[in-house]
Amino acid sequence: MATNFADYKNIWVYAEQRQGKLMNVALELIGEGRRLSRDISEDTKVCALLVGNEIDHLAQECFEYGADEVIMIQDELLANYTTDGYAKVIYDAIVEMKPEIVIYGATHIGRDLAPRVAARCNTGLTADCTRLDIKVSNYIEYNKANTTLNTDTLDPNDPDTGIKQTRPAFGGNLMATIICPRTRPQMSTVRPGVMQKIERMEGATGEIINVKPEISASDIRTKLVEIVKHAKELVSLTDAEIICSGGRGLGDASGFELIKEFADKVGGVVGSSRAAVDAGWIDHSHQVGQTGTTVKPKIYFACGISGAIQHLAGMQTSDIIVAINKDPDAPIFEVADFGIVGDLYKVIPEIIKEWDNAEELHDHAMAK
Amino acid sequence: MAFKIIVCAKQVPDTNEIKINPETGTLIRDGVPSILNPDDANAVELALDIKDKYDDVHVTVVTMGPPQAQDMLFECLAMGCDEGILVSDRAVGGSDTWATSNAISAAIRKIGEFDLILAGRQAIDGDTAQVGPQIAEKMDLPQVTYVKKFAITDDMKTITVERALEDGHEVIEIQTPCMLTAIKELNTPRYMNIAGIYNPDKKITVWNAADIEVDLTTVGLKASPTNVFRSFTPKPKGKGMMLAGDTEKDLAKDLLIRLKDKHVI
């Protein structure tokens, strides 16, 4: 049975909420969905899909971050996330309302939910995207600036409005752009921290479409016993403006004491390489890279990190990268804006000492 | 009656060993070892741990891939699994996650009865984490992904797991039969042992598309809803500036001046 593409309209963003709070990635994706929707056509809307119970208050936030419409699905049985419950009501809504594109955050919940919904729709799903394009001209521009792709075979005036979903594979060694040419909706999960929120539009409103879900307790085959928040400090790498990351070059676990002191001084968050996590020096929640968190801070300090390709995949779009490493041949220097070859145990304490004098040092240097 | 576990596993290139040919921008696969996907090894370990603790547990590993994926199945048998099944056919080549889950689900139906299906959360070559949940969907099974802790009641009916979240975990109860996907925090996979390798009762079966009676319009490259539009390598970011200075203090000062100049501090 052929899908009539003309029946499918609008971009849905799964606006993931947990315990009545929107995930940051939901706002990022509303921003991205808004940009993409305008590239499809003037009358394509970005719709925030809210699923839960007693979450009316979240609609406003979705509008203020750029949603044209909010689709609200509420029921007591949806108070907490369950695969069965959420997959059912989202699938039913998709069948009823036929969105052209559905995007989800690639969180532990998004990556549990999206594959089931996509399989039930018998449509394609592209995981962990780091870039989405509608217009071929934008796609060409992106590739010219960032990749080795030969763009001569692409036509900037190509009228195709299918979504081009770009994602890393093979540990970030290779990038692939995936399309979904024969089925609808097109679906992607997108890495948290990659897309940009729009500037909040205070007081913005839009239409709320309330969908009454058909759900009964027997639809949900798992029982949520408890949700445990870890008492340890919350590491919000994706929101951090400055990240101080340590790697194998620290030598041992105590090296993270210096990294912590450094991060505290500069108002940053502690990150790490996979090697440091694997060595048991620090918790996985601090890990930056392909199998950890993708980050894009204003400054990324890589301390004693050699720069394995998996690590680079998770941080190389940082605005400024500073690398401190003993080994002048470490691959991290290939992506660093500023490199210091030296002993991090000697260099970092000096940066900490001089940090508050930066303005004075700068003025003094300029005056010379 | 035996408690039957099916583990879905994949043979993958060790991505830590992959290099890029800077001339052509393509992957250099020569000499790159193929391994049992790390998360799948955690799924195998969970199955074997259940087998160690309870009587009459049977563990079958199923995979899809080229003939050489049998090497990975031998590894699983040597770890202690009872049986290996390889689905190998050109007709299933180039399958995306949707089509792969159709093929694996057909193989599972062919195997017949099962109480528990396990898989790794994701494979290191594609990192999609989609095939496990999509098999669960095709088999109409409840699922829990990102499992980091596991317990089962003595009647082998009720499983309690911890499911990792970004900032904590959920405790979830689920009834067999079901699908669970494992993460590395779950356990430490055991090594292969000689007794496992030389057990004549253990066998590997290779099935083609006809054997698993799969609808050929739902597998392979052409049936896959997603296609690769382009593939390429990231452009290396231009090499930055190496700072020079006689002392660490000079280096630190120079760095701070430059950061200030960029308006990032």
Image (cartoon, coloured by chain):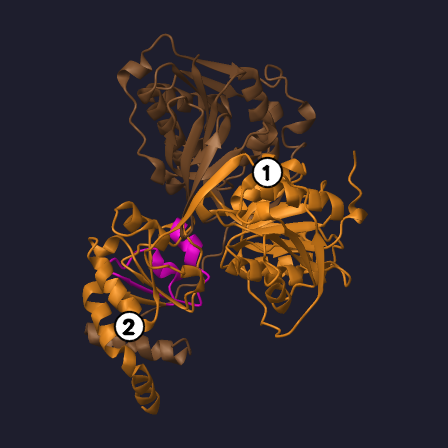
Chain colours: A orange, B brown
Same chain under badges 1 and 2? The reply is: yes
Q: Is residue B155 above or below residue B201?
A: below
Element on which disc 2 rests: helix
* The residue stretch that appears in magenta: A309-337
Q: Is residue A114 left or right of residue B239?
A: right
Q: Which mark is residue B222?
A: none
Side of A59 where A347 appears, left or right: left
Q: Distance from label 1 to label 2 (Cα)?
A: 51 Å
Where residue A51 sits: x, y (%)? Answer: 61, 51
- Mark 1 secondary-structure assignment: helix
Task: Report the side of A49 relative to B121 (left or right).
Answer: right
Give the residue at mark 2. A265
Mark 2 belongs to chain: A
Residue A145 picture location, percent across and down = 55, 62
Which quadrant holds residue B100? top right
At label 2, the amino acid type is Lys
Query: Between residues A342 and A274, which one lies in front from this camera angle?
Result: A274
Q: Kindly identify which chain the residue marked by label 1 belongs to.
A: A
Identify residue for label 1.
A217
User: On screen, A348 above or below B72?
Assistant: below
Q: What x and y, as percent, mark residue A307?
A: 35, 54
